[in-house]
Amino acid sequence: MGEGDLQDDVRELRKQVEALREVLGEVAEPYREIAGYFDQLQTITRGYFRLLDLYAKHGAVSPDLVIPGLKDDISKHIVTVLFEKGDRNISQITESVKGKRGTASRRIVRERIQELEGQGVLVSARGSRGRTFRVSEEIVEKWSQVLGFPKYKDQPVQGQGNTR
């Protein structure tokens, strides 16, 4: 065998190695995607077990875990109502609180809302239905952290690829 034949054989082997690398890269791609899904599943499972742990420790998973200043029942119900559906006016909040606890005066609800707004728990905005209230972004973020879930599901979590 001559030196030329040996170089041809080496070139041919390089081509074959490169072809194998390309094929392996294509074959491995679905496995990378599956690994991303497993990461997501693991995150969700951790959040689920965190919820179970919170429930076992506290008997319920309620906003007062995030907002320790919620001492009275009406304030807890106001925050809960606004977590369920934000951008409500005082009348709508009062009706929802009445539905949850049986009684609620519009005057008391308004007072509690003012206190919660002063503490930074709620924020207000002028809307078509008058002044509406919602839970502040800071509290929503804390609540998401307590529950163990990312705040926005459409934003990728670092280290998990672009599968979200």
Image (cartoon, helix red, strand yellow):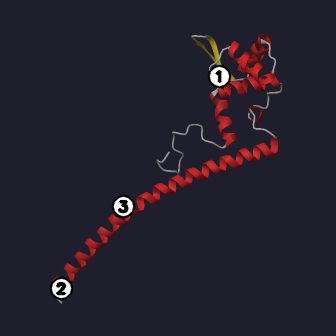
Circle 3: element type: helix
On the image, the x and y values in percent for residue 133 come to: 65, 18
Please give the name of the residue rendered at 71% of the width and 19% of the height, measured from the top-left corner: 117
Q: Which mark is residue 26?
A: 3
Task: Pick whichever of labels 3 and 1 is earlier in the sequence.
Answer: 3
Three-letter amino acid code of the residue under disc 2? Glu
Three-letter amino acid code of the residue under disc 1? Arg
Please give the name of the residue rendered at 80% of the width and 23% of the height, measured from the top-left corner: 101
* Image height of 110 relative to 86, above or below: above
The reply to whether callout 3 and callout 2 are in contact (CB within 8 Å) is no
**What is the CA distance from the residue labelled 2 to the residue labelled 1?**
80 Å
Task: Pick whichever of labels 2 and 1 is earlier in the sequence.
Answer: 2
Q: Residues within 10 Å of mark 3 (few under 14, many from 20)?
A: few
Please give the name of the residue rendered at 24% of the width and 78% of the height, measured from the top-left corner: 10
On the image, the x and y values in percent for residue 134 come to: 65, 22
* Image height of 45 relative to 105, above or below: below
* Image height of 150 relative to 70, above or below: below
Q: Which residue is mark 1?
A: 134
| Residue in the foreground of this view, choosing between 55 and 6 | 55
Q: Which residue is mark 2?
A: 3
**What is the CA distance from the residue labelled 3 to the residue labelled 1?**
48 Å
Three-letter amino acid code of the residue under disc 3? Glu
To which quarter of the image does residue 38 belong? bottom right
* Image height of 136 relative to 40, above or below: above
To which quarter of the image does residue 126 belong? top right
The reply to whether callout 3 and callout 1 are in contact (CB within 8 Å) is no
